[in-house]
Image: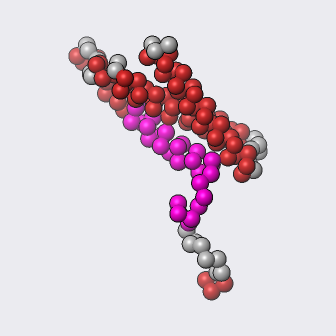
């Protein structure tokens, strides 16, 4: 059976073989966003535990600094992107946007929308606006 294989590309392609496209970017961002959300959830849980035990917020100076605003933006982006990805899966389940061109367009729209919404929310929450 392997003697009939006439394709010169590897049977198990990797990043050097595939051309980047929106769905690939969206898949990788979805996994990274899930990891970011789990780490953020753990940090919030530890912060709340310390707050309940000591009565003061740990690293309050860091949380309310520009670095804290960057962390908030990253968390909000990850959370919003995960929500949009779940919405995209619901759209796929209805049978829509399954063509590669439409899927890539939807992936780019999701990324842009997540960035814009996270930026707006970060500015509002941090009081910069």
Residue at 43% x, 26% y is 72
- Is 67 on the left-hand or right-hand side of 100? left
Is 61 situated above or below 74?
above
57 and 24: which one is in front?
A: 24
Q: Compare residues 86 and 36 and report the one nearer the observer.
A: 36
Direction from residue 19 to residue 124 in the image, left or right: left
Q: Which residue: 59% across, 73% down?
A: 9
The residue shown at (49%, 39%) is 33
Q: Position of residue 95 (x, y in %)?
A: 77, 45
Where, by quadrant of the figure, is residue 112 drawn? top right
Q: Is residue 30 left or right of residue 95?
A: left
- Residue 62 position, x and y percent, is 30, 23
Main SS class of the magenta portion in the image = helix
Residue 68: image x %, image y %?
A: 37, 24
> Does the image show residue 100?
yes
Q: Residue at x 57, y 26 (%)?
A: 117
The N terminus lies in which quarter of the figure?
A: bottom right
Q: Is residue 111 magenta?
A: no
- In the displayed structure, 35 sits above or below 43; it is below
Q: Provide residue 4's location: percent of width, then percent of height.
A: 66, 84
In the image, taking residue 127 as reference, residue 42 lies left or right, namely: left
Span of residues in magenta: 13-41
State the image quarter where residue 59 is shown: top left
């Amino acid at each position: 059976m392997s003697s009939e294989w006439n394709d010169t590309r590897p049977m198990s392609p990797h990043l050097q073989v595939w051309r980047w496209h929106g769905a690939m970017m969206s898949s990788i961002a979805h996994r990274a966003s899930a990891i970011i959300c789990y780490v953020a959830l753990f940090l919030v849980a530890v912060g709340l535990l310390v707050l309940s035990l000591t009565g003061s917020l740990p690293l309050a100076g860091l949380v309310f600094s520009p670095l804290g605003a960057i962390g908030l933006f990253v968390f909000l982006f990850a959370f919003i992107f995960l929500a949009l990805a779940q919405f995209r899966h619901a759209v796929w389940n209805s049978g829509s946007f399954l063509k590669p061109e439409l899927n890539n367009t939807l992936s780019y729209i999701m990324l842009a929308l997540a960035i814009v919404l996270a930026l707006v929310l970060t500015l509002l929450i941090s009081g910069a606006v």
